[in-house]
């Protein structure tokens, strides 16, 4: 059986009892970074064999896991943080298991984009998760433009090195919409800034940023093709931040 196990995005207190049970009983734990996952396992007193499974060896490693599953082994797949397959390796392996008729299931848990969406204060009834945009400016703007007329809330991941460029391009493509920028979710210095994209850009420009960011942007307004009913669901919100609980991360 293949188990896709969601792990904490920062606060180790978020791991589920079921996730721990699966990790303890798995024949092999497949992970993006065995050193990082090794620290997670050690924290919970778990000693299991590990194998590497990341974006650069995903197809080859998937075949090794398929062979283990054919032998009746239990394999737990984890990403460095969050849910496997969500902007992390896992999709290829899931497809291969389905093709082979091999059993698989998921141990649900944290996903940064869901937490950021809920905390953003923007509409949650319909949203589009786009993951990481392209790195190059021209490709990034084309990527953003695909959803320029969408009425749904838009969600993106970005590294600290490119988050300012992403926000600047979002302003160029979407205009100065309401948005929220989340960082260090579930950690001691958890922060969610809310406001116009221009206000968020002013916050991050020329700053030494760390950690992964989640950018949440309101959908198109009625003037851009959105219904008046949906406009009423979009509050105008001001900048704010919140602190997470003091539980050690990995």
Image: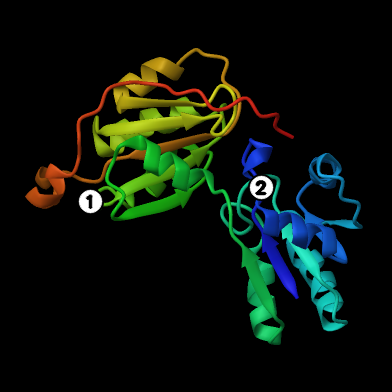
Q: Residue 82 carries which label?
A: none
How is colour applied across the structure in the image? rainbow
Q: In which quarter of the image is the C terminus?
A: top right
**How far across and down, in percent of the image, does residue 225 sit?**
13, 51
Quadrant of the rendered image containing residue 210: top right
| Residue at x 54% of width, y 48% of height | 111
Dot 1 alpha-carbon crowd within 10 angstroms: few under 14, some 14 to 19, many 20 or more: some
Secondary element at tag 2 = loop
Q: In this view, does 48 lie to the left or right of 219?
A: right
Seen from the viewer's position, the closer of residues 138 and 71 is: 71
Q: In which quarter of the image is the N terminus?
A: bottom right
Q: In this view, does 244 lie to the left or right of 48?
A: left
Say whether disc 1 or disc 2 marks the residue closer to the N-terminus. Answer: 2
Secondary element at tag 1 = loop
Give the residue number, with chain letter if any, for mark 1: 149
**How far across and down, in percent of the image, does residue 67 sit?**
85, 78
């Amino acid at each position: 059986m293949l188990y896709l196990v969601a792990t904490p995005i920062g606060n180790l207190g978020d791991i589920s009892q079921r996730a721990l049970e699966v990790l303890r009983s798995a024949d092999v734990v497949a992970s993006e970074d065995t050193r990082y996952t090794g620290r997670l396992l050690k924290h919970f007193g778990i000693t299991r064999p590990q194998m590497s499974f990341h974006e650069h060896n995903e197809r080859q490693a998937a075949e090794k896991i398929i062979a283990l599953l054919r032998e009746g082994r239990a394999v737990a797949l984890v990403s460095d943080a969050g849910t496997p397959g969500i902007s992390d390796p896992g999709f290829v392996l899931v497809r291969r298991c389905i093709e082979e008729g091999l059993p698989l299931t998921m141990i649900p848990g944290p996903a940064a984009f869901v937490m950021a969406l809920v905390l953003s204060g923007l509409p949650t009834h319909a949203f589009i998760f786009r993951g990481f945009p392209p790195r190059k400016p021209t490709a990034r703007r084309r990527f953003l433009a695909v959803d320029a007329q969408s009425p749904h809330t838009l969600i993106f991941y970005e590294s600290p090195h490119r988050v300012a460029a992403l926000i600047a391009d979002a302003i160029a493509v979407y205009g100065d919409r309401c948005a929220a920028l989340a960082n260090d979710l579930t950690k001691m210095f958890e922060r969610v800034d809310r406001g116009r994209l221009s206000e968020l850009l002013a916050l991050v420009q020329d700053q030494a940023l760390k950690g992964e960011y989640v950018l949440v942007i309101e959908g198109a307004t009625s003037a851009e093709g959105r219904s008046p009913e949906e406009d009423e669901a979009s509050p105008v919100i001001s900048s704010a931040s919140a602190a997470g609980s003091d539980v050690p991360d990995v």
